Amino acid sequence: MALSRRVLLGHLAATGAAGAAVTAAGPAHAARPPHGGGRPVRTGFDMLAADGYRLLDGRRIGIVTNPTGVTSGLDHIVDVLHADDRVRLTAVFGPEHGFRGTAQAGGSEGRYDDPATGLPVYDIYQKSGKELAEIFTTSGVDTIVFDIQDVGARFYTYIWTLYDCMVAAVLAGKRFLVLDRPNPVTGRSATGPVLDKAYASFLGREPIPQAHGMTVVELALLFNGEFVPKAAGRPVELETVRMSGWRRADFFDATSLPWVPPSPNMPTADTALVYAGTCLFEGTSLSEGRGTTRPFELLGADGIDRRWAEAAGELGLPGVHFREAYFAPTFSKFQGKTIGGVQLHVHDRELFDPVRTGIGLLVTAKRVWDGFAWRPDHGIDKLTGSSTVRKMIDKGAGTDEVVGAWREGLERFRAVRRRYLRYR
């Protein structure tokens, strides 16, 4: 007799939990080998499950997640939790791109019932404060769980969904649990300009740098210690589950974990490596590579030729080469039109600095192409966290001068950041 999907998932979770002590894979997949050749890493969810979901005992759970919320064996954690009688999972909350990840940038999937589990899925993209608190109250949950793969950049919106949910949880009187996953570009250091609160938006609510060098658990601890009490009147009732096996110097492929694209234009961990710098081109008239197979690695515009790659190469930026490239985006800027530009080739990621590289590319693009322009809404200011970068480049400042302008603020943040780091 065929087993139902729910019974089968429950059986897998139960048998996997029994073997959790002898495998680095998630509790639902004791027999499965690691996906990569790197160090065995167990995510926060894997650790939670290996502990028998003790932190969820007796609670009505709502989970904020997306396609990256998977076990080491690639089953979605919502499916696994829903199938386990030890857990009362009653709601799912979808961020930008949606719970199942079908929406493009700036979109979501709306309110619906998940066909696989029957659970209500609430759209929380760009919802915050009392509006988000009311959604949590309506859902009937008493504990919010957050489990999403971040990519290490301030303007990647999932960390601000985390922040908004923490604030709303205070307002709604809910507990909050954060499950950790790796920072795919390492957690070695923070770099880039620190946000000026006058420029706060969903691309950055609070003053952290462009590349924060933290995991989501570390960010949650930072938010709760420095920012949530100011926004909500007190800290959220916060619990966290750390990973095992991850080290600060680990890139994603140094782990055994599978890569699941966190958003439609983040197809590989290589994309994440450059994103904290090249996403700045969203604030310009140039294409940031959306609509190609190499978003954020390909940059260009109509009328750009080999001079840009040559000028960028002359900067001597460490760890990266620039190739003259031509491409035709299938959507977004310059859709269907063949344009010229550069492709980034990171040859030494230990030396590569994505933010410095992004600034160097902005400086040289403005110098060699007379069609260069900032987006009329000055979106670049939201991305960099102030008007400083834009104004300095407009006045002819070079890469070193622009980078030097944020050094003092960055050092202050690094001193605060050290108090919240939890991994070697």
Image (cartoon, rainbow, N blue to C red):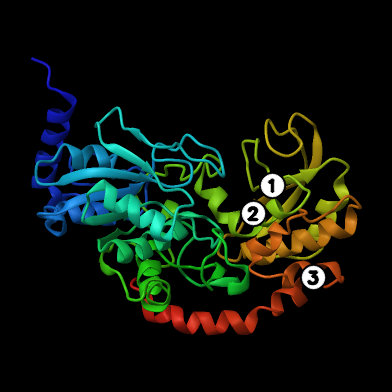
Whether residue 45 is situated above or below residue 121 in the rendered picture: below
Residue 109 image point, x, y percent:
45, 36
Give coordinates of residue 279: x percent, y percent: 64, 54
Q: Which mark is residue 288?
A: 1
- 205 up-or-down from 344: above or below: below
What is the three-letter code of the residue carrying label 3?
Lys
- Disc 1, disc 2: CB below 8 Å? yes
Give the residue at the far top of this rendering.
1
> Callout 1: 10 Å neighbours few (<14), some, many (20+)?
many
Outermost residue, right direction? 370
- Secondary structure under the numbered disc 3 in the rendered image: helix
Quadrant into which the N terminus falls: top left
Residue 173 placement (x, y as % from top left): 25, 64
The residue under label 1 is which amino acid type? Glu
- Where residue 391 is drawn, which disc sits there? 3
Alpha-carbon distance for marks 3 and 2?
Answer: 18 Å
Q: Residue at x 88, y 51 (%)?
A: 307
